[in-house]
Amino acid sequence: MKLQQTSQAPAGVRTAPRGNWIPIRMLAPRHRERVLAHLLALADDARLLRFGHVASDEQIGQYVEQMDFGRDELYGVFDRRLRLVGMAHLAFDNDGLEVEFGVSVLPKARGKGLGTRLFEHAVMHARNRGVGLMVIYVARENVPMLNIVRNAGAEISFDGPQVVARLALPEDTLGSQIGALLDHRAAEFDYQVKLQVRRLDGLWPAWTWGSGAHGAS
């Protein structure tokens, strides 16, 4: 028997007040290896929350290999070492009117609001692409994600160990379009700064050695 708990579809998505800004960058095919490394780093309990089952390394590899960066949208949060610590995947259906959302955050980056911000970011971009419905499959044990979609006003249905959340999205506005553009530019700038710092870190030991800095007093 299917148990169902519903809430009225919202006129607009409800989100929590934002805290500190988090740079969320769009991912491209060149990030595929980073995406794979991120998902493989998830422990069994995190894989259960992300995929609804404890996905094997092979299954994760197939999932990443089949990602369509041309049709779908993927977003990531990078740490200072350019490791992917949080990631969201928007998988669009063929007509582009419905999208499935999935998110994962590494343990060291949890408790900082990354899941919420990735969700809000994905909602904004889905709206801007004219999507009317977002679907999120959530494990019952994934309490943080359930709270996020409930707070957004999603319709929740329970079926066995899985929860299906359906969120009706409002139409895009000039504000949502500008917001997405500003977020993209700011996140790209943040990524390039981190990239340059990493490159300088790699060059620094060789530069100091070559300049005679070691034992030159």
Image: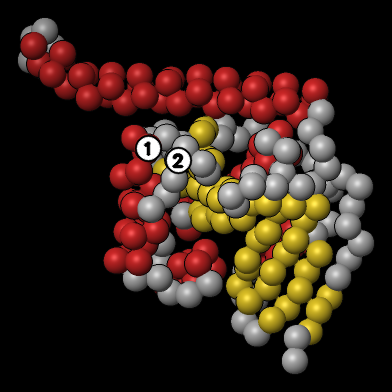
Instruction: Identify the element where label 2 is drawn.
Output: loop
Q: Are marks 2 and 1 in contact (CB under 8 Å)?
A: yes
Q: Residue furthest bottom?
A: 1
- Please state the horizontal and vertical placement of residue 188, each as a whole percent of the image: 50, 23
Q: Amino acid at mark 1?
A: Pro
Residue ID for mark 1 = 29
- Residue count near mark 2 (Cα–Cα under 10 Å), binned few <14, some 14–19, many ≥20: some
Q: Which mark is residue 69?
A: 2
- Residue 162, by quadrant, is bottom right
Q: Is residue 7 left or right of residue 96?
A: right
Instruction: Identify the element where label 1 is drawn.
Output: helix
Between residue 191 and residue 180, name the one nearer to us: 180
Judge whether residue 2 can be spotted in this image: yes
- Location of residue 207 with respect to 202 vertically, above or below: above
Between residue 99 and residue 186, name the one nearer to us: 99
- Residue count near mark 1 (Cα–Cα under 10 Å), binned few <14, some 14–19, many ≥20: some
Q: Quadrant of the N terminus?
A: bottom right
Residue at (32% x, 59% y) in the render: 61
Q: Residue furthest front?
A: 95
- Please state the horizontal and vertical placement of residue 33, each as a whole percent of the image: 31, 45
Q: Is residue 116 left or right of residue 174?
A: left
Colour setting: secondary structure
Q: Quadrant of the C terminus?
A: top left
The total number of labels drawn is: 2
- Location of residue 28 with respect to 145 vertically, above or below: above
- Residue 135, by quadrant, is bottom right
- Please state the horizontal and vertical placement of residue 164, each as a whole percent of the image: 69, 69
Q: Amino acid at mark 2?
A: Phe
